[in-house]
Amino acid sequence: MAEVIKFTSLGYGDLRLAKQYCSRPILENLFQTEGGIIIVDQNGEEIIPDNESYTLIPSNTYTVVSEKDLESDSEEDENHHNNRNTDYLDDYDDEDDSNQYEIDQDHSQHVHNHNHDSSSSSPCCGGDHDHSEHIKENNQFDQVGFQKLLKMREERIKMIKENYTPKHPEIFKLKEEFFEDKFINAVREYKKDKNNQHLLNVLNKMSETGLYSFKIFNMDFCSKLLEEIENFRDSGLPTARVNSMNNYGLVLDEIGFTSFFQELREGYLSLFTALLYPNHYGDRLDSHHAFIVQYAMEKEVDLGFHYDESNVTLNLCLGKQFTGGSLYFKGILNEPKTHNELLEVQHSVGTALFHIGVHRHGVNSLTSGERTNLILWLRYTSGISE
Ligand SMILES: O=C(O)CCC(=O)C(=O)O
Ligand SMILES: [Fe+2]
């Protein structure tokens, strides 16, 4: 297994990368640092590369700074102590659409997770919409920052494409044999006679607030996907944070699953979402952000109370074995009369949930084992301008 180094940067998100890839040219490329890169350890000491490669310790976190950022910081400091870079990063965070929105203790308000150190570096979904629509036209710093994040993402994808050897190449293209029989038969019947009842028969309604469970993929597919994720982790190729709250996981769109999820959304999921969530754009979803979240005793054991940056979310438990780690749901964001809801769901392997993005939820502590879930944030973005 690769020895993985964790990098953090001011506003450009975190990155995990195997030691063997930690050379100056690769890091400069992945972080798109203009005018050279500076790596700083936990004590603020600069690490000087020896022959373009750095001596780094896997359990430590290193901060990435660009020469240019430092230069403009000191210029700004001279100019009335106004730190321009940080200002722009604040603005950028507002446009990042890979966020969850954390809800505070009394559950009455939401707070945008706005911490630079933990900001996501995944600018968007890998879906087929125009990413730039999220940018405020008249803010040049947003434009520059967003373009840089997109470039960073492109560089990760390129590096993965060139270096990754999939364990199960056959699962990167969606095939009907991956589905549970009941699911695919219902879809086939629905396509023949357009009778919604076929779709409803697959779903187990869990609340009046739009929570449903159902079986979608068979065990063979779930375990192959899990093995693929582990294989990718072992490769040590770059992984960015999946969103603003989960610390462990990977963006499936970055490792080659974009068309898989696009076909899944367009050909299958949209039939269900149009029926269940017409008031939440379920009938016109046009993009997605597909990622994996992982919990383990020595990593991360829970997830705070939040809502998602999605219209509709699909959450599929892939494994492996665990106790604890149940999901809880507590009402819809802008519907106070639903806030006394408390639904606890013990997710089981192979089961998927559908809920609307604004259905407030969190994950209780894992008590043993490892829990890996596939999360698909489904969105309608066309025609929505900032
Ligand atoms: O781990 C889970 O089941 C939920 C993850 C989640 O809510 C999220 O990533 O937005
Ligand atoms: Fe969530």
Image: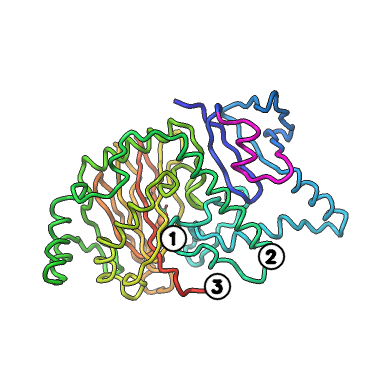
Q: Out of 156 and 218, give the one closest to the viewer.
A: 156
Contact between labelled residues 2 and 3, with CB atoms less than 8 Å apart: no
* Cα gap from disc 1 to disc 3, whole angstroms: 18 Å
Q: Is residue 334 above or below residue 124?
A: below
Residue tagged 3: 386
Ligand 2 occupies quarter: bottom left
Q: Is mark 1 within 8 Å of ligand 2?
A: yes
Residue tagged 1: 308
Name the image quarter holding the N terminus: top left
Residue 69 on image: x %, y %: 74, 48
Residue tagged 2: 140
Residue 177 on image: x %, y %: 18, 47
Residue found 21% across the figure and 40% down from its top? 220
Tell me where residue 91 sits by quadrant.
bottom right
Please give left or right for residue 208 compared with residue 192 in the image: right
Please give left or right for residue 182 compared with residue 131 in the image: left
Q: How is the image coloured?
A: rainbow
